[in-house]
Amino acid sequence: MLTDWVVSLEGTEAGHQLALILALAAAVLHAFFGALQKSKLDPWIARGCMDAGYGILAAGAAIFLVPMPEASLWPVYLGVFVIHAVYKVLQAFAYTHGAYTVVYPVVRGTGPIFTVFGAYWFFGETFQPMQWMGVAVLLTGIFGLAVYNMIFLDVNRASLRPALILAVLTGGMVAVYTTYDAYGIRLAENPFTFLVWFFLINSLSITPYAAFRWYHMAERPKIGFLIRRGFLGGAVAICSFGSIMMATRLDKVGEAAILRETSTVFAALIGWAFLKETVGPRRVALMTLIALGAVIVEMGG
């Protein structure tokens, strides 16, 4: 049985290797998820339709594939609902006020800093000196990318300060939900049951407001486009967030969080390959630092 096999890998070298693969897969998929959000769509509408997409997919799995969660998980799911709702609201406000190319690296750079400390306080995880060096290298690349974009790209400077404050707050919520979700999936007897109900419950926070906002727009996006975007984004979100949560059950939360932030590199590569964005030598150098930092963290563990 798949669940028994996954549980048997916890705390083993094979589990560590699988967690590494899952964290890197989450990074790639999160970059695609971010690219889907990076559009002319209103950030609230974009997020709402993708939440609806993964909610519908999760509902099908909850009906046909997994049992009801154990009673001890319902208070955890209440926390999931509140924490992720706050995160989504902050993220939408940050994207509303600031350019994606500036906000995204700040969010992704701030998140792992807080997560590493959260993993220490809640799970007793520690980093070796070499790993801290890797964290410094990775964060230098991420924040350097944000500063570079802020200086050289065409951004709305009038709203830049509130956008950066919102980005830091959003990064803090990334750390909160990463740590809390790791606690939840470790508490569950069946990790797949936890994941399915996590996505079903998590989908209910922003979707109603997004539908209300869409209904009152003067020029509404076509419903067919939103359905396609919703199911595509929803499937990517399930694979991305599901992978990182499974990685935090199998291995260390802090290491998984750091490796996931290589998504900044993949986001830039996707922007270059599919969105026709320019990637010059400075940005390549900064992305190299991000990748190098992740490698140092992994090697130093």
Image (cartoon, rainbow, N blue to C red):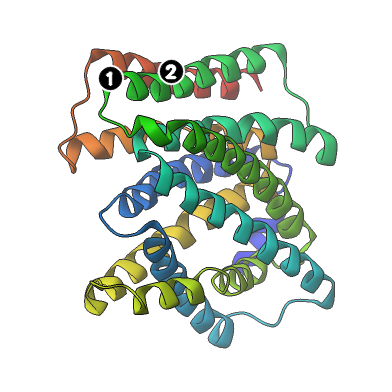
User: Who is closer to the viewer here, 115 or 224?
Assistant: 224
* Above/below status of 4 relative to 10: below
User: Who is closer to the viewer here, 196 or 282?
Assistant: 282
* Above/below status of 10 relative to 242: above
At x 58%, y 25%, the residue is 298
Q: Position of residue 93 (x, y in %)?
A: 48, 50
Marks 1, 2: nearer the viewer: 1
Q: Which residue is mark 2?
A: 144
Q: Position of residue 275 (x, y in %)?
A: 19, 42
Q: Are marks 1 and 2 in contact (CB under 8 Å)?
A: no
The kind of secondary structure element at disc 1 is helix
Other residues around mark 1 within 10 Å, as few (<14) / some (14–19) / many (≥20): few
At x 50%, y 16%, the residue is 140
Q: Position of residue 97 (x, y in %)?
A: 42, 43
Q: What kind of residue is marked 2?
A: Gly
Q: What kind of residue is marked 1?
A: Phe
Residue 83 quadrant: bottom right
Closer to the N terminus: mark 1 or mark 2? Answer: 2
Q: CA distance from mark 1 to mark 2?
A: 12 Å
* Above/below status of 72 relative to 9: below
**Given the current orientation, which residue lies at the most extreme bottom position?**
63
Quadrant where the image shows the C terminus: top right
Other residues around mark 2 within 10 Å, as few (<14) / some (14–19) / many (≥20): many
The kind of secondary structure element at disc 2 is helix
Q: Which residue is mark 1?
A: 152
User: Who is closer to the viewer here, 65 or 228?
Assistant: 228
267 to the left or right of 92: left
At x 51%, y 46%, the residue is 22
Quadrant where the image shows the N terminus: bottom right
